[in-house]
Image (tube, coloured by chain):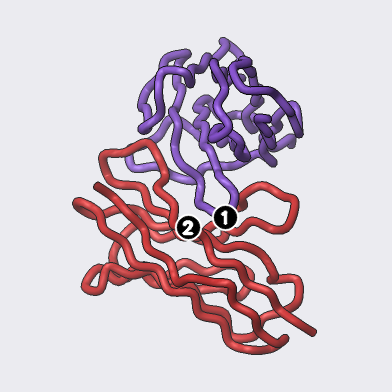
Amino acid sequence: GNSVTQMEGPVTLSEEAFLTINCTYTATGYPSLFWYVQYPGEGLQLLLKATKADDKGSNKGFEATYRKETTSFHLEKGSVQVSDSAVYFCALSDQNDYKLSFGAGTTVTVRA
Amino acid sequence: DAGVTQSPTHLIKTRGQQVTLRCSPKSGHDTVSWYQQALGQGPQFIFQYYEEEERQRGNFPDRFSGHQFPNYSSELNVNALLLGDSALYLCASSLAAGPPVDTQYFGPGTRLTVL
C-alpha cells in the first residue's frame, strides 16, 4: 500500500538557519504530493503541493520538488524564523484514492 | 469566508460510551473527510462522504460511522469507546474532484479523551 516516511525529529534550529526535512514515499502510479503544517494549537494547513514529476511547489519561502526517480519530496527553506516552529507533515494521494496518507510528522523548533 | 468548523473543541467520555462529533465544511465544498490523529502521529483516514454517501473508508472498525447532511455538514459517531480512541479528530473538506485528491482544508479538530 501507499506510505510516507519522514525524517525523524525533533529538529531544533537557530533563526536564519537552513532547514531540510526529508520525505520519501511508496505508491502505485504517480501520486500527488503535499506538505502540511500544524502550528501549535491549530489544525493542519496546506503549505505546498506538487502533482507531477519535476514539479516544484513553493510557499512562504518553503520549496519542495517532486522527484520520481528517488521517490522523494524533501522540504527546504533557506532562512527559518521563530514563527516557522511547527509540526510538518508530508502526505500523498494516490491516483486512485480519495484520501491523504500522511507521514508521522517532524517537529521543528526555531530559536531566536 | 468561514473555513472548516468543528464542534465541540474538547470532549471527555468514559469507556463504553458513544460520542458524536460535528463538522461544517468550507463554503462551496461538498465533500467531507474524517481523520484520527493520535498523539505524536500523523492523521489516519477514517472515511469520506460525498452526496450523503460514504465514498471511501480507511482501516477502522464498524464502531466508527458517519453521516452527511444535505447542507454538506457531517457527523462522526463512535460507539463503545475504547481508551485507544483518545485522539484529535480532524475534519477536512474539499470539492468532489478526484481521485487523486486535490487540496483538503482541515478544521481545528476535536480533542477526544476516553477515561
Disc 1 versus disc 2: distance between alpha carbons? 7 Å
Q: Residue furthest top?
A: B70
Callout count: 2
What amino acid type is highlighted by mark number 1? Answer: Gly
Query: Chain coloured red: which letter?
Result: A
- Residue position marked by numbered label 1 in the rendering: B40
Please tell me in which quadrant of the rendered image residue B78 appears.
top right
Q: Are marks 1 and 2 in contact (CB under 8 Å)?
A: yes
- Nearest the viewer among A56 and A3 is A3
Helix, strand or loop for disc 1: loop
Question: Which chain contains the residue that carries disc 2?
Answer: A
Where does residue A55 sit, x and y in percent of width and height? 36, 67
Left or right of A93? Residue B19 is right
- Residue position marked by numbered label 2 in the rendering: A104
- Nearest the viewer among B46 and A37 is B46
> Mark 2, residues whose alpha carbon is within 10 Å: few (<14), some, or many (≥20)?
many
Q: Residue at x 40, y 39 (%)?
A: A99
What amino acid type is highlighted by mark number 2? Answer: Ala
- In the picture shown, does residue A94 fall above or below A7? above
- Nearest the viewer among A52 and B23 is B23
Left or right of B62? Residue A70 is left
Where does residue A57 sit, x and y in percent of width and height? 46, 66
* Residue A94 can be seen in this image: yes
Left or right of A11? Residue B42 is left
| In this rendering, the label closer to the viewer, 1 or 2 | 1
For the C terminus of chain B, the quadrant is top right
Query: Chain coloured purple: which letter?
Result: B
Where does residue A72 sit, x and y in percent of width and height? 33, 70
> Mark 1, residues whose alpha carbon is within 10 Å: few (<14), some, or many (≥20)?
few
